[in-house]
Amino acid sequence: MKFFKLKTYETVERLKEIDEKLPQDISEKVQSMPGDAFDERVSENEMISYFHIEESDFYFIINILFENYVKLEYEDITFDVLMDKYEFKDEDFEIVKKDYIKNNTTLDIVLDKINLKGINSLNDIDKELLESFS
């Protein structure tokens, strides 16, 4: 699973309209996708959604939005999550992030973090991993 950031430029009403028009099999597929997500409304016409989801499932959702002419931007933020660059407002999603970091941090990630942010940027997980190699 990966982390993605999706920014859409639509009203809540328009996004609900798209959701309600989806064929039942597509709607059920989206609802049954494993993973986590949460939304932050930035303004009336702008929302940021964060996903922890399989890449193929994320692109399935993106295709639905494209087919409905939703203006959007998206990016894979998995590396940035591992580098601990995101602090999510949703407590449950923050727990998902911390578990992901704990289970997916590698020595290469820790060394990248040191190169990019300095030795003082290391958290307890990073320090434990480094100590296991010394």
Image: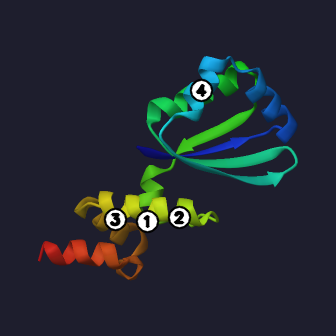
For mark 1, what is the residue?
Answer: 98
Q: Going by the image, does 115 lie left or right of 16?
A: left
* Cα separation between marks 1 and 3: 6 Å
What kind of element bears circle 1? Answer: helix
- Mark positioned earlier in the residue sequence (3 or 4): 4
Residue type beneath disc 4: Glu
**Label 2: few (<14), some or many (≥20) within 10 Å?**
some
The front one of 107 and 32 is: 32
The residue where tag 3 is placed is 102
Q: Quadrant of residue 10?
A: top right
> Three-letter amino acid code at disc 1?
Lys
* Residue sitting at x 47%, y 40%: 34
Q: Is residue 27 above or below residue 9?
A: above
**Label 1 crowding class (10 Å Cα cut-off): few <14, some 14-19, many 20+?**
some
Amino acid identity at mark 3:
Lys
Proximity of marks 2 and 1: CB atoms separated by less than 8 Å = yes
Q: Position of residue 93 (x, y in %)?
A: 55, 59
Q: Can you tell which mark lies on residue 73?
A: none
> Which residue bears the numbered disc 2?
94
Q: Residue at x 38, y 77 (%)?
A: 123
Label 3: element kind: helix
Q: Earlier in the sequence, mark 2 or mark 4?
A: 4
Q: Are marks 3 and 2 in contact (CB under 8 Å)?
A: no
Where's residue 16, x and y in %?
A: 80, 34
Residue 28: which quarter of the image?
Answer: top right
How far across and how far down the image is residue 12, in percent? 83, 41
Comparing labels 4 and 1, the label whose residue is closer to the camera? 4
At label 2, which amino acid type do we have?
Glu
Picture layout, residue 89 above or below residue 128: above
In the picture, the disc for residue 28 is 4
